[in-house]
Amino acid sequence: MFLANPIFLQAVEKYVRPTISEERNKDGKTPRELFSEEHEILIEKGEKWMKDNASSCALVASLIITVVFASAFALPGGNNDDGIPNLLHKLPFKIFVISDALSLFSSTTSLLMFLGILTSRYSEEDFLVSLPTKLIIGLITLFISIASMTVAFGATICIVLSEAWKWVFIPIALIGCIPAILFAKLQFPLLVQIYSSTFAPTSFQPLKNRSLYI
C-alpha cells in the first residue's frame, strides 16, 4: 500500500551506517533520491486517491453541516412568546438538541480534516503519519456526524408522531439508521487497512533499538 512506503524506507535506514545513506551510485544519486525517483508515480497515485476521497467526503460533510445548522434554528415544537422552546423539558427534545449539536461539531471537524488533506504538500513524510491520521480522524468524525444526524431525525419523528401515530415513528426511526450502518460497513475495512499500515507494529520494529549495521 502506498501509505506504507516511507515506513519501509525509514526501517531500512536503521540497518545501514549513516555514511552509506549519503553515498552516491554511478548516476550520482543517494539512496533516498533513488527511492523518491522510483516511487514518484506511486506518490502521484496516492495523492490523486487522497484528493478524490477527501473531496467526496468534504462534500458530504458540508451537506451535513448545512442540514444540522438549519435544524438548530427550526426546533421541533416551536417556541413560546418568550422564545423558549415549548418542549424544552421533554426527553426527545433534549436528545434532538444534543445529537444535532454533536452532528454539527463532528461534521465541522471532519470537513477541516479533509480540507487539511486537500491543502497538504504531499511529500513522502506526509504519507507516513500526517495524511493517514487526518483521513482516519475525518472518516471517524464523519461517521459520528451521520449517526448523530440520524439520532436527531429519530428524535424529531418521535416528537412529531409519537402522539398521533405511535406505531409509525419506531419503524421510521429504525430505517433512518440504515445510512450510518452502510457507511460504517463500507468504510471500516479502509480504516483498518490505513491504521494497520500507519500505526500497527511491523517486522522491523522488534529490532529498532539494536545497533545492527550492514
Image (tube, helix red, strand yellow):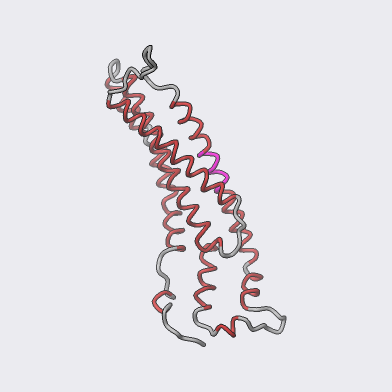
The answer to whether 74 is drawn above or below residue 56 in the figure is above
Boundaries of the magenta span: 54-61
Name, please, the residue furthest toward the right.
27
Q: Main secondary structure of the magenta part?
A: helix
For residue 127, side relative to residue 209 (left or right): right
Q: Position of residue 141 (x, y in %)?
A: 43, 45
Q: Nearer the viewer, residue 59 or 45?
A: 59
Q: Position of residue 165 (x, y in %)?
A: 30, 18
Queried whether the magenta region covers residue 196, the answer comes back as no
Name, please, the residue furthest toward the front.
82
Name, please, the residue furthest toward the bottom.
214
Q: Position of residue 128 (x, y in %)?
A: 52, 64
Queried whether the magenta region covers residue 59, the answer comes back as yes
Residue 75 falls in image quadrant: top left
The answer to whether 58 is drawn above or below residue 125 in the figure is above
Please state the total of marks drawn on the protein image: 0
Residue at left 54%, top 68%?
6
Residue 208 falls in image quadrant: bottom left
Name, please, the residue furthest toward the top.
81
Residue at left 61%, top 63%?
42
For residue 182, side relative to residue 40 (left or right): left
Q: Nearer the viewer, residue 165 or 132?
A: 132
Residue at left 34%, top 19%?
160
Residue at left 62%, top 81%?
22
